[in-house]
Image (cartoon, rainbow, N blue to C red):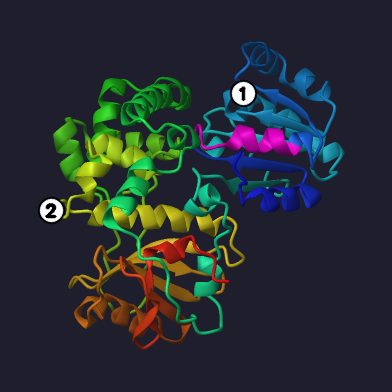
């Protein structure tokens, strides 16, 4: 069993909040985590609404179902019975003891059509994603907190990661079931079944979708656009959908946590910045599967690894942000004249760290134009820029800009 680094955040929330909701895509490890917590260190009754008997009881008489529970209680896959939220609210209003309800959901519960109350002020929402590289290796990552730290980044040598190894990591992704399968055909079978389950179950539950048969094609087209700006007109034309229909489908895929677009960073300065979102799915293993790319193909120097490598780094940053002390928001930066930084991490107090990704062994001065532009734009809020590359040395490459091996993402700083 993997040690999930979000565990400490969940336990902290249970100590002072009546309801804790753990959201994340299906099969990312939510049930495993909450069952472990329910045994120890947060002893609780465990109920899963994947059980048809429990689901029938919850939907048939939600008030009686909640009043009959002995708390603390874990309710898994609560999005299958959104009727429970109102009686949970009433139960909390009469007894606000912390840690009474630990809920999990595989789709964005706040978008569920019958949910009438968001439990605002009573519920903390945490996100769990597929496994990070540090969780797989058993090393708690501190990359984000080091990046935002006051100290200069320590110059050191790290093992250079080969193209073949990074290709294997990208194609494997972070879903526990996929990582456990070494045979590529068995991984492919898992992803096929996974996509079918999501579309047949979660999307249908969220909304009646007439064009469900086109959803797998939409996912494949999104995978092909990974790292690029979302082109709604092109997608609409390729699928034969009206743009409002496409927007609805994208929202549904976002609600299932499969589609995770990256917003643009911008501010009210007199500079023309691109504001369209960039396309990313939630896992590079899933993306590579939809693109029909295997590790051998990706390891070939003639193959363009850039978009998948960028997505891989973005997902690692997204995962680490959920348990880091800084807990930054994630964006990208691009000017109208083409200066770009792949990822912009913004702390709650507005400090900025830029992260650029290079699928090469060297970093040249000409590749830093976007980072310099970002630093100039944000001024004193700019903490530093980091260029992640395929080499093995941590080196200064410009004012407040450091080149670091990609492996620094999951290698502890100490």
What is the distance, in whole Å, between disc 2 and disc 1 at their CAs?
50 Å
Residue labelled with disc 1: 81
Q: Nearer the viewer, residue 38 or 49?
A: 38
Instruction: Please tell me which residue is depicted at 45% across the width and 21% down the height of the picture.
Output: 201
- Residue 278: in sight, yes or no? no
Q: Earlier in the sequence, mark 2 or mark 1?
A: 1
Left or right: where does residue 295 sit relative to residue 240?
A: right
Dividing the image into 4 quarters, which one contains the N terminus? top right
**Residue 179, position in %: x, y?**
45, 37
Residue marked by disc 2: 302
Q: Residues within 10 Å of mark 2 (few under 14, many from 20)?
A: few
For this view, does 148 lie left or right of residue 187? right
Vertical order, 332 against 112 (above or below): below
Residue 34 drawn in magenta = yes
Q: In terms of image quadrants, where is residue 313?
A: bottom left
> Where residue 379 sits: x, y (%)?
41, 86
The quarter in which the C terminus is drawn is bottom right
Q: Tell me: 74 left or right of 111.
A: right
Q: What residue appears at the point 32 percent right and 31 percent down from the top-left corner?
A: 184
Q: Which residues are magenta?
A: 26-37
Q: Quadrant of residue 394?
A: bottom left
Question: Which residue is at 68% across, 15% downward?
Answer: 54
- Up-down: is 308 above or below 178? below
The answer to if 36 sits in the magenta stretch is yes
Dot 2: element: loop
């Amino acid at each position: 069993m993997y040690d999930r680094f979000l565990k400490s955040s969940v336990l902290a929330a249970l100590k002072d909040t009546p309801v804790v909701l753990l959201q994340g895509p299906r099969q990312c490890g939510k049930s495993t985590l909450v069952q472990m917590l329910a045994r120890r260190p947060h002893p609780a009754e465990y109920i899963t609404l994947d059980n048809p008997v429990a689901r029938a009881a919850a939907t048939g008489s939600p008030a009686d179902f909640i009043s009959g529970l002995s708390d603390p209680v874990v309710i898994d896959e609560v999005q299958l019975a959104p009727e429970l939220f109102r009686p949970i609210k009433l139960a909390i209003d009469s007894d606000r003891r912390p840690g009474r309800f630990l809920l999990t959901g595989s789709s964005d519960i706040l978008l569920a059509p019958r949910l009438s109350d968001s439990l605002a002020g009573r519920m903390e929402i945490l996100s769990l994603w597929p496994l990070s590289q540090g969780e797989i290796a058993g090393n708690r990552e501190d990359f984000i907190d080091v990046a935002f730290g006051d100290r200069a980044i320590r110059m050191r040598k790290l093992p250079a990661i080969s193209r073949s190894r990074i290709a294997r990591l990208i194609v494997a992704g972070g879903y526990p079931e996929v990582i456990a399968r070494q045979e590529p055909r068995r991984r492919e079978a898992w992803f096929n079944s996974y996509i079918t389950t999501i579309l047949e179950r979660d999307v249908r539950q969220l909304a009646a979708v007439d064009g469900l048969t086109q959803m797998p094609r939409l996912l494949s087209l999104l995978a092909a656009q990974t790292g690029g700006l979302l082109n709604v007109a092109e997608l609409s034309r390729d699928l034969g959908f009206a743009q409002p229909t496409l927007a609805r489908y994208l929202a549904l895929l976002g609600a299932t946590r499969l589609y995770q677009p990256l917003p643009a960073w911008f501010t009210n300065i007199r500079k023309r910045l691109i504001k369209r979102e960039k396309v990313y799915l939630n896992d590079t293993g899933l993306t590579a599967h939809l693109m029909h790319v295997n590790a051998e193909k990706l390891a070939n120097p003639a193959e363009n690894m850039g978009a998948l490598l960028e997505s891989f780094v973005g997902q690692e940053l997204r995962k680490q942000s959920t348990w880091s002390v800084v807990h930054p928001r994630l964006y990208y930066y691009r000017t109208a004249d083409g200066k770009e930084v792949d990822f912009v991490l913004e702390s709650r107090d507005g400090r900025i760290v830029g992260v650029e990704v290079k699928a090469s062994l060297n970093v040249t001065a000409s590749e830093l134009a976007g980072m310099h532009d970002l630093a100039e734009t944000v001024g004193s809020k700019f903490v530093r820029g980091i260029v992640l590359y395929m080499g093995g040395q941590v080196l200064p490459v410009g004012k407040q800009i450091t080149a670091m091996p990609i492996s620094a993402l999951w290698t502890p700083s100490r």
